[in-house]
Amino acid sequence: MRTIQIPYFIPFVALALIAPYYLPPYYLYIAIISLYYSILASSWNLLAGYTGQISFAHAALSSIGAYTSALLVINLGIPTLGGIVMGGLSSFVVGYLLGKVCLRLRGPYLALTTISFSEIFRIIVTIEYEYTRGSLGLNVPPLFEARDFITYYFVFLGLFTVIMSIKYLMLRSRIGLFLRSIREDEEASNGMGVDTVKWKQFAFAVSGLFAGLAGSFLAHFILVVSPEMGRLGEMALIISMTVIGGMGTFWGPVIGAFIVEFASELLRDVGRLQLVVFGALILVIIRYFREGIWGYIDRIFRGRLHV
Amino acid sequence: MSPVEFLNYFFLQLVYGLSLGLLYGLMAVGLSLIFGVTKMINFAHGEIYMLGGYTYFFTITLVGLSPVLAMLSSALVGILIGVMMERYVFRPAYNMQQQARDEYAIIATFGLSILLQNLALFWFGTAIRTPPPIFDAKLTFGLLELFGDRVAAIVISSTILITLYLYVAKSWTGAALRAVSQNMNAASILGISKTKMNALSLAVGGGLAALAGALLSNVLLVYPDMGVIPTLKAFVIIVLGGMGSIFGSLVGGLLLGVVEALGSTFVSVAYRDVYGFIVLILVLLLKPNGLFGELARRI
């Protein structure tokens, strides 16, 4: 984990702060959704890219957060912000338990268990329509009374900044080394004294917390939660973003999320080939440049741009 | 519900479950063979099944072949796709470390499945197509009415499963396949080409998946993401039967049918798809080698 060098960051921070005032609402909307996916892809990357635990339950964890928050706010009338906190906590707990259950499972077995978990959740949510209105989706009260995209943009930007900072501090500390050692070789890392059981559960729980927070914020922005949020297609998006941007790199998933989200929105009229291209990119990148676009940029600027 | 009606209902659910279980078994056996031999999971298996369904549909409607010939051409297309997948997706990973190979296999085949699904969506659109049945008749056994297609599918798939089992258990090539699945490097030292055996496993697996697509196309219809549910069921089956075991896939398919029938009768029909997943999680947690623990290592 290299240290972030502040001077290179100033233009990006400035862009992020000024852009919303000049972007038309449609692009601003896409930017907000991209921020949501940046958080999801980054937190999936923490689990899959750094710790080597490829879970397919991430979209489900995000929708667990969204449903928890929505149901609490609607049925118990607690304030929206309280609902969001509860949403994040519920995904934290579910992520922790999922990690506990999956401790002994590796590779394909872990993938299958997490797929099953997310499908079970999606089917339950679809069928129990008395509580969730099934596939029609649940109408969710907004976070703010005024429908102002700029405010929402800054809320998401704030959440994004907080989560990325926590992730940065975590990865730069010993925790980052523990997680990466699990990915490289679990037995060896255990032999060297790393409590792999503890840190695997930690990675599941923390990435669940981030996903749940992002999901519940999104619910109170798009004003609807439906089982669509947890389907495998969402997982496909998260994986494309992370892999295309660069798995196991710090900024890769963020770049990937913006590229994939903007490309799929802006090229919507051109045809339905975007996902074909993303699928092909996954195949090429995972075989030839495992570090993705970020790794490529990093290689070009190596020695000059230390991020 | 009176007890007689109840039994009747359960019986219907059981026949329905067993027949579908057997057909999904055809998918499962290919997946299981591929995993056993190459040690890599294939998330794009459902897309071979989907392309098999489309081949069946278009060779009948556009080319005008008879259903049986169309079925054979589907299988041929499946074999071709399987061989190409081995060459371009699987082969680069043979020399990777276990952990890196797992990661590569999951992500690359998942990417391939996104690619193929959306290519089908682009070429064929979202239209749901109903190909003509293979065997157009209705059979009645007492209270039970079965469509000829389903009966044909059951007969064909169980014949294939048993033939394949005997082939792998008795023939020379079968022994070579088993050798590679037990120890890839030792097998290649003894002069068995691991590349050939891996290609063979993908060809057989691909052919069977495409055949399953053709056989089920009249019952479950043809559309771009038709492969998702059968793949998930096939995964449940191979986990139940033990990965890498052909006999396990056959029994796993039947067991899944029973589990779904029991769940649908005693709990709720709406949750039919959930029971399999619950069984999958429980088996992985309690008996990770599948129900046929010691058989899991054999094919």
Image (cartoon, coloured by chain):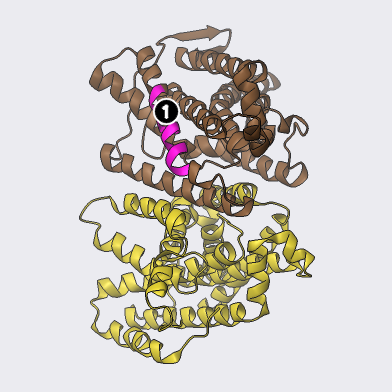
Chain colours: A yellow, B brown
Q: Where is residue A155, by image quadrant? A: bottom left
Q: Residue A173: percent from the left, percent from the top?
A: 64, 81
Q: Quadrant of the C terminus of chain B?
A: top right
The reply to whether residue A276 is visible in this rendering is yes
Q: Residue B286: percent from the left, percent from the top?
A: 77, 44
Could you say whether the residue bearing mark 1 is in a helix, strand or loop? helix
Main SS category, magenta section: helix
The reply to whether residue B245 is visible in this rendering is no
Residue B83 belongs to magenta span: yes
Q: Quadrant of the N terminus of chain B?
A: top right
Task: Determine whether, in the image, residue B204 is placed left or right of residue B70.
Answer: right
Q: Residue B243: percent from the left, percent from the top?
A: 66, 36
Task: Determine whether, in the image, residue A152 is placed left or right of residue B268.
Answer: left
Badge 1 local density, few (<14 within 10 Å), some, or many (20+)?
many
**In this figure, which residue is indicated by the disc labeled 1?**
B78
Residue closest to the eye, B76 or A27: B76
Residue closest to the eye, B233 or A202: A202
Residue drawn where x is 67% and y is 24% of the image: B247
* Image position of A133 with respect to A299: above or below: above
Residue A109 belongs to magenta span: no
Residue closest to the eye, A8 or A13: A8
Q: Residue B93: percent from the left, percent from the top?
A: 53, 47
Task: Determine whether, in the image, residue B134 is placed left or right of residue B271.
Answer: left
Q: Amino acid at mark 1?
A: Gly
Q: What segment carries the magenta color? A: B76-89
* Image position of A94 with respect to A88: above or below: above
Q: Where is residue A299, by image quadrant? A: bottom left
Q: Chain of mark 1?
A: B
